[in-house]
Image (cartoon, rainbow, N blue to C red):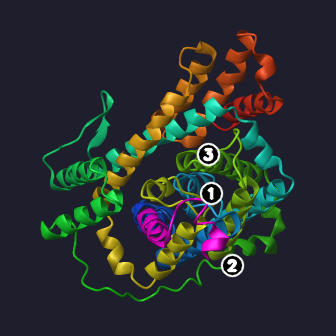
């Protein structure tokens, strides 16, 4: 096992990998609760029952997709990156595809399945890996730094430390509220532990926050440890139902659905892979080793997830929390995967992992990823502009893909004006055109 994952080469051991895998799991376990709520359109009034997906089945599908996806990434690509159904893509599926377009959720899952197959084909041709390697080093650093700000903002918002405001869009939350105070306690505790170099500081901080939350009554103490496993029958294989009526698949709407899934997943995944690989020190000569395997694992996970009955399964930026506590190999992803499998049996314990518990991890990891600001040559305006736009647009647009799109439109332009166009890979010009068309036809 040690030889396969090359523990010695990466200066790691079972303790670091297991702790990293557990930390990653705790950081992204929220998806087990959130995904069923989003895809079932829970709380949305006036929605017919046939438009809603079964929450129990989605819970199991989410756990299984995360289990198999993380195994693929760990065993095939040997990266400490875990996978699960992606946030944002699930909201697009539920509120745009099903609720707005009126496409049956079964047909929507077929679209997810198609996007996974197309991704697998593109990966086998080497196109996806070529695109990632064509991205300039400093833009990779900008993507990583931007994601750091993005996940920090997500953590602060989900915990209530930052809330919406009609006048200023966002503002400081009610810091005397119990859950907010608990999140603040978690951040301070984790920062102190990390500052004094306590091994596994982020993981310990999450555990401490959970314990304090239960002792103060801010986190519900589970009444049971083991719960009954819901049936996956309502969603399993539903992606194939559309083939009974092929006419549903030959429409402009269905094509838009597939292209949107392809676009968002590609650049969310690319951004996540680059960010985590950079943090772990894997990027060599501006290239990511085994990138093809990582992308292929991601594609297979999407296909399997669609068959189980959930939206696009993608690489999670929360994996950076596991890397922060020492994870360096795919063994950590295997650990995370089995945690998701076990979660099916211990669903009541998931109540403990609230936003107040995950916020400290996201904030501290955001700080660590912000170190990539130093890798950007801010004195060169032609580089500073696209880098800054990439970084700032991620949290402001609440989308990794949108931040990348905006920055990658500016990069060829500023380099061209500065007469450095020969340094720009042709793929970057192609991406600029693609992103412009995306904004016109999808966000226009």
Specify whether 417 is left or right of 326: right
Q: Residue at x 36, y 88 (%)?
A: 226
Viewer-nearest of labels 3 and 2?
3
Disc 1 is placed on an element classified as loop
- Residue 399 or residue 51, whichever sits in front: 399
The percent coordinates of residue 327 (x first, y second) are 50, 61
Q: Is residue 310 visible from the viewing direction of this image?
A: no
User: What secondary structure do most residues of the magenta stretch adopt?
Assistant: helix
Disc 3 is placed on an element classified as helix
Whether 7 is among the magenta residues is yes
Placement of the N terminus among the 4 image quadrants: bottom right
Q: Which mark is residue 237?
A: 2
Q: Assess disc 3: are there few (<14), some (14-19) or many (≥20) residues with their C-alpha within 10 Å of its C-alpha.
A: many
> Is disc 3 in contact with disc 2, using a CB cutoff of under 8 Å?
no
The percent coordinates of residue 140 (x first, y second) are 62, 36
Quadrant of res 301: bottom right
Whether 416 is among the magenta residues is no
Specify whether 102 is left or right of 175: right
| Real-space Cα separation, disc 3 to disc 2, in angstroms | 33 Å
The residue segment tinted magenta is 1-25
> Earlier along the polypeptide chain: callout 3 or callout 2?
2
Q: Pointer 3: what residue?
A: 274
> Earlier along the polypeptide chain: callout 1 or callout 3?
1
Vertical side of 161 occupied by 202: above or below = below
Disc 2 is placed on an element classified as loop
| Real-space Cα separation, disc 1 to disc 3, in angstroms | 36 Å
Q: Which mark is residue 102?
A: 1
| Real-space Cα separation, disc 2 to disc 1, in angstroms | 20 Å
């Amino acid at each position: 096992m040690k030889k396969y994952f090359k523990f010695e080469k990466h200066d790691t051991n079972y303790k670091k990998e297991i702790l990293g895998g557990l930390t990653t799991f705790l950081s992204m376990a929220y998806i087990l609760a959130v995904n069923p709520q989003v895809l079932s359109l829970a709380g949305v009034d006036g929605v017919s029952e046939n438009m809603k997906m079964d929450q129990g089945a989605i819970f199991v599908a989410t756990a299984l997709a995360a289990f198999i996806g993380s195994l693929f990434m760990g065993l095939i690509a040997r990266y400490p990156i875990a996978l699960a159904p992606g946030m944002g893509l699930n909201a697009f599926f539920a509120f745009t595809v099903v609720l707005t377009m009126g496409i049956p959720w079964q047909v929507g899952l077929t679209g997810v399945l198609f996007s996974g197959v197309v991704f697998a084909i593109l990966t086998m041709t080497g196109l996806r890996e070529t695109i990632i390697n064509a991205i300039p080093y400093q833009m990779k650093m900008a993507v990583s730094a931007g994601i750091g700000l993005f996940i920090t903002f997500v953590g602060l918002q989900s915990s209530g430390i930052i809330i919406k405001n009609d006048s200023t869009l966002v503002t400081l939350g009610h810091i005397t509220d119990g859950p907010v105070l608990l999140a603040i306690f978690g951040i301070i505790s984790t920062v102190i532990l990390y500052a004094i170099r306590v091994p596994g500081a982020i993981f310990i901080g999450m555990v401490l926050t959970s314990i304090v939350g239960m002792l103060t009554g801010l986190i519900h103490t589970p009444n049971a440890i083991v719960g009954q496993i819901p049936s996956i029958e309502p969603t399993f294989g539903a992606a194939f139902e559309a083939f009974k009526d092929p006419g549903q698949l030959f429409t402009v709407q269905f094509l838009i659905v597939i292209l949107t899934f392809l676009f968002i997943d590609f650049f969310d995944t690319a951004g996540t892979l680059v960010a985590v690989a950079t943090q772990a020190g894997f990027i060599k000569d501006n290239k990511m080793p085994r990138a093809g395997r990582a992308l292929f694992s991601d594609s297979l996970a999407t296909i399997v997830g669609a068959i189980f009955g959930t939206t696009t399964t993608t690489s999670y930026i929360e994996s950076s929390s596991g890397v922060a506590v020492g994870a360096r190999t795919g063994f950590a992803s295997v650990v995370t995967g089995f945690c998701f499998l076990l979660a099916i049996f211990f669903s009541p314990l998931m109540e403990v992992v609230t936003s107040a518990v995950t916020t400290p991890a996201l904030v501290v990891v955001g700080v660590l990823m912000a170190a990539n600001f130093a890798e950007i040559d801010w004195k060169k305006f032609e580089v500073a502009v696209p880098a800054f736009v990439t970084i700032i647009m991620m949290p402001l647009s609440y989308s990794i893909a949108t931040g990348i799109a905006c920055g990658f439109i500016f990069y060829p332009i500023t380099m061209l004006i500065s007469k450095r166009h020969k340094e720009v890979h042709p793929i970057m010009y192609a991406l600029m055109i693609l992103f412009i068309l995306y904004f016109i036809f999808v966000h226009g």
